Image: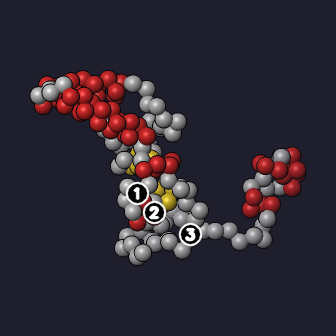
């Protein structure tokens, strides 16, 4: 970047590595087997499902709705076929509702909830950011050594 252009920009528009060119920068972790869209999957792979806050909020809400429905259906003694029919209608109405998530991004690969941040039942936005190559780095295709 030219000095004249840098002088016109505010300090927060100048990249941090331009302000400190002699500082050693961490290499990006995008070649790591735990890297997904800027996030680190290491802890999730180590203990799958342990951190419930990483699960998709919409999927969690649907599960809560289903659990409540099952309890009510059992309390009323509904037959499985009747309960299934009622749930199908209820779930279709849930699918038509706006997605109650600030991270929702249209375009994912999952049929029910097409969100670009959804991976299985995980919300990639909830996972910790990848800070770059670290001590846990493993090249893609390698087995996990813990």
Q: In this view of the protein, which residue sits in the foreground, 107 or 121?
A: 121
Numbered mark located on residue 43 in the image: 2
Q: Mark 1 — residue?
A: 50
| Residue placed most toward the observer, 34 or 25 | 34
Q: How is the image coloured?
A: secondary structure
Q: Is residue 93 above or below residue 144?
A: above
Q: Are marks 1 and 2 in contact (CB under 8 Å)?
A: yes
Give coordinates of residue 99: x percent, y percent.
43, 31
Q: Where does residue 23 sit, x and y in percent of width and height?
A: 75, 70
The spot of residue 52 in percent (x, y) is 42, 50
Mark seen at residue 86: none
Q: Nearer the viewer, mark 1 or mark 2?
A: 1
Q: Residues within 10 Å of mark 3 (few under 14, many from 20)?
A: some
Q: Quadrant of the N terminus?
A: bottom right
Around disc 2, counting alpha carbons within 10 Å, would you say few (fewer than 14), some (14 to 19), or many (20 or more)?
Answer: some
Classify residue 146 as left or right of residue 85: right
Q: How far apart, in angstroms, are the residues tagged by discs 3 and 2?
A: 15 Å
Which one is earlier in the sequence, the residue at label 1 or at label 2? 2
Q: Is residue 81 above or below residue 104?
A: above
Marks 1 and 2, how far apart in space?
9 Å
The residue that label 3 is drawn on is: 133
């Amino acid at each position: 970047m030219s000095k004249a252009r840098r002088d016109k920009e505010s300090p927060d528009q100048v990249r941090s590595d331009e302000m400190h060119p002699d500082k050693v920068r961490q290499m990006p972790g995008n070649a790591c087997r735990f890297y997904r869209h800027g996030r680190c999957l290491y802890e999730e792979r180590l203990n799958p499902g342990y951190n419930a806050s990483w699960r998709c909020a919409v999927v969690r809400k649907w599960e809560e709705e289903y659990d409540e429905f099952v309890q009510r259906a059992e309390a009323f003694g509904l037959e499985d076929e009747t309960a299934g029919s009622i749930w199908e209608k209820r779930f279709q109405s849930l699918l038509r509702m706006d997605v109650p998530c600030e991270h929702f991004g249209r375009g994912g690969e999952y049929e029910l909830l097409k969100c670009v941040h959804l991976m299985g039942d995980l919300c990639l936005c909830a996972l910790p950011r990848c800070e770059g190559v670290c001590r846990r780095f493993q090249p893609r295709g390698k087995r996990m050594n813990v």
